[in-house]
Amino acid sequence: MSRAAKLTLAGTSTGALAIIVLVHYQQRAEKIAMHAGVIRDFEQQRVKKERQADFDMQRALEEEYRKVQKVHDGEGPVEAGEAQETGKQRSWWRLI
């Protein structure tokens, strides 16, 4: 074989080997990144479930309190009985 042929063979072999190594490195990096994404998704789902549980608990407490107390949510006119009770409460608070 001529010297040029040997150099060409060595160059192409080295290039092919370098490409193979880089592709394997890139695949490993992508696999690690994808795994980190899965872990992040599980964490987000856990936090979302915790927040939903807190919201449901607050909703249940609100319903319990509404059963026990009269609550005016600010919508619509206030009835006469509610206005008198509110006035009594305000005068009581002024005494404190």
Image (tube, rainbow, N blue to C red):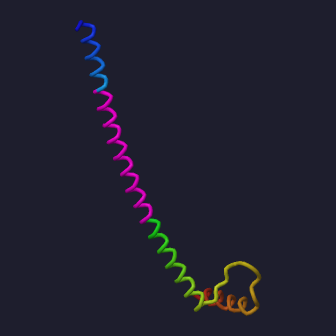
- Residue 2 belongs to the span the image colors magenta: no
In the image, 62 versus 14, the foreground residue is 14
Question: In the figure, residue 62 lies in which quadrant?
Answer: bottom right
- Please report the residue visible at 55 percent of the width from the left and 79 percent of the height from the top: 59
Query: Residue 27: image x %, image y %?
Result: 35, 40
- Please report the residue visible at 47 percent of the width from the left and 74 percent of the height from the top: 53
Query: Residue 50: image x %, image y %?
Result: 44, 70
Q: In terms of secondary structure, what is the magenta stretch mainly?
A: helix
In the image, 44 versus 90, the foreground residue is 44
Query: Residue 15: image x %, image y %?
Result: 31, 22
Query: Residue 72: image x %, image y %?
Result: 67, 83
Residue segment shown in magenta: 17-46
Is 2 located above or below residue 20 in the figure? Answer: above
In the image, 14 versus 51, the foreground residue is 14
Question: In the figure, residue 81 lies in which quadrant?
Answer: bottom right
Specify the quadrant that holds the C terminus: bottom right
**14 left or right, relative to 95:** left
Specify the quadrant that holds the N terminus: top left
- Residue 37 belongs to the span the image colors magenta: yes
Is 35 located above or below residue 86 in the figure? Answer: above
**95 left or right, relative to 21:** right
Question: In the figure, residue 85 lies in which quadrant?
Answer: bottom right
Total marks in image: 0
**51 left or right, relative to 70:** left
- Please report the residue visible at 40 percent of the width from the left and 61 percent of the height from the top: 43
In the image, 4 versus 85, the foreground residue is 4
Seen as rendered, the residue at the extreme front is 1
